[in-house]
Amino acid sequence: MSGTVGFSDAPLAEAEKTDLRRFCGYPAIGAAASGEGSWRFFTAYGSFEWRMNNLSVSELVQTRQYLSQIYPLETALLNVSAGLDTAEAAVWRRNPDEMRERAALFAMWRRRLCGFLGVPAGPDLGDVSRVVI
């Protein structure tokens, strides 16, 4: 993905890590000082945490580029609800597939972020057609 010039190469802020977890489909981890967090270091969660804390300079810039692409997609998805109550008004007609199309685009970019970071999609971004018993 080009156009990464201008993004910070500083270590990720805690808010950015929270957004990365959220966008990659992982749950909140809580405060590390709680003593309940050690389990995550033996799973994909731990791998994800390690990657976020050890990205190279160019990977930090690229990660922020992904975030800059995903934030407006999330906002656009939230704004779709403003037109759900109107099917047609004058020359404007609501796209009945807009919510599904925006959700698919949002999910695609989230999956691309997971692929770039080398982590499996988290439970929130998993395959919805698959049921694990």
Image (cartoon, helix red, strand yellow):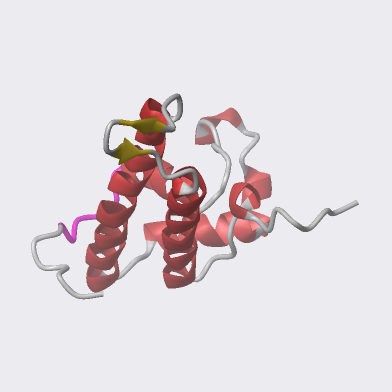
Q: Is residue 77 visible?
A: yes
Q: Nearer the viewer, residue 84 or 18?
A: 84
Measuring from the top left, give residue 86's x and y in whole percent: 41, 27
Residue furthest right in the image: 133
Would residue 14 be visible to someone looking at this image?
Answer: no
Q: Residue furthest left?
A: 6
For the N terminus, give its image quadrant: bottom left
Q: Is 91 placed above or below 63 here? A: above
Q: Does residue 44 appear to the left or right of 87 in the view shown? A: right
The front one of 50 and 119 is 119
What is the x, y in percent for residue 133?
91, 51
Verify whether residue 51 appears in magenta.
no
- Magenta region, residue range: 8-14
- Residue shown at 41%/61% (left/top)? 109
Q: Which residue shows up at 28% across the image and 56% down it?
A: 69
Q: Position of residue 59 (x, y in %)?
A: 29, 69
* Residue at position x 58%, y 56% in the image: 46
Task: Residue 23: give x, y in percent of width and height.
Answer: 46, 49
Would you place residue 49 above or below residue 56 in this image?
above
Q: Is residue 122 left or right of residue 110?
A: right
**Helix, strand or loop for the magenta stretch, by majority:** loop
Tell me which corner region of the image, top left, top right, bottom left or bottom right, holds residue 95: top left
